[in-house]
Amino acid sequence: MKVADITAVLEQFAPLRIQESWDNSGLIIGSPEDDVHGVLVGFDCTPALILEAVEKGCDMVVTHHPLIFKGIKRIDGKDPVGAAIMQAIRSGVAVYAAHTTADKVITGVSGAMARRLELKNVSIMVPEEDGTIGLGCIGEFPQPMNGMQALKYVQEKFGLKVIKSSKPLETPITKVALLGGSGGGEIPLAQAKGAQLYITADISYHNFFTPEGFMLMDVGHFESEVEIVDIFVAQIRKKFPTFASYKSDALDRSNPVHYFVV
């Protein structure tokens, strides 16, 4: 097996050409012609993930978030990114990321959120090209519910400890917009699409001052996107059912944001 064989599967699912201009999806470390004997899939490419790959005999890791996102002027082993780069190169581990590519297909990040909530009549929120790709999605709850009911429903479906929310609506909510990851910039688009509730992450303080008839939930960056790891694993196993492909054993513990009740 070659690196190119694995990347071809991932890019058939989430083509590189659709990534956002600021993104860095694709093969980040390694060559397409490198041999691969096993693939480990995680959410972020950390030194711990590279070490786990080596321990499992994997010479390729696939993540959602790119290891190298912005320009790097120095590779320092004391920095988590630098340490992961050094470990990957020293260990001969190829590194691939499918970031906004997986955000912009309906079977990717936001689509997984919609399926978890059992939304009906789901479509892309911000369609591009022929309408088959784009950021976010929008759909309808299985049955109308008020704001407090929606909070309890979302918490249960996502298995959340906490949710940040604007003032819960007392009126029935039917139409819901979703965008995994940092979706603050798309709040006006969700409103324009007629959503009564918008679920995303990384929302800033002032955005919680919502207009009448509109509610906002921040469910957490990791929590909104982490299901994409299972989707990547499923894509690889579907094409290569006997190939050594693994989901990180530490995935549930890899969220860098910790919540405390003291």
Image: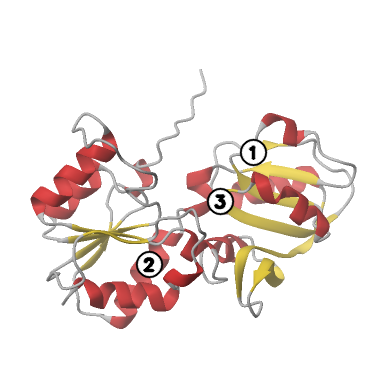
Q: Earlier in the sequence, mark 2 or mark 3?
A: 3
Residue visible at 28% across and 54% down in the picture: 248
Residue 123 rendering spot, x and y as whole percentages: 69, 71
Residue that badge 3 annotates: 158
Kind of residue at disc 3: Phe
Q: Nearer the viewer, residue 158 or 125?
A: 125
Q: CA distance from mark 2 to mark 1?
A: 27 Å
Amino acid type indicated by mark 2: Phe
Residue 231 location, quadrant = bottom left
Q: CA distance from mark 2 to mark 3?
A: 19 Å
Callouts 2 and 3 close, C-beta under 8 Å: no
What number is the disc on residue 203? 1
Answer left or right for 120 relative to 76.
right
- Viewer-closest of 216 and 161: 216
Numbered circle sitting on residue 61: none
Q: Position of residue 141 (x, y in %)?
A: 74, 62
Let me know if residue 97 appears in the view.
yes
**Is 232 placed above or below 165 here?**
below
Q: What mark, if any, has residue 232 been given in the picture?
A: 2
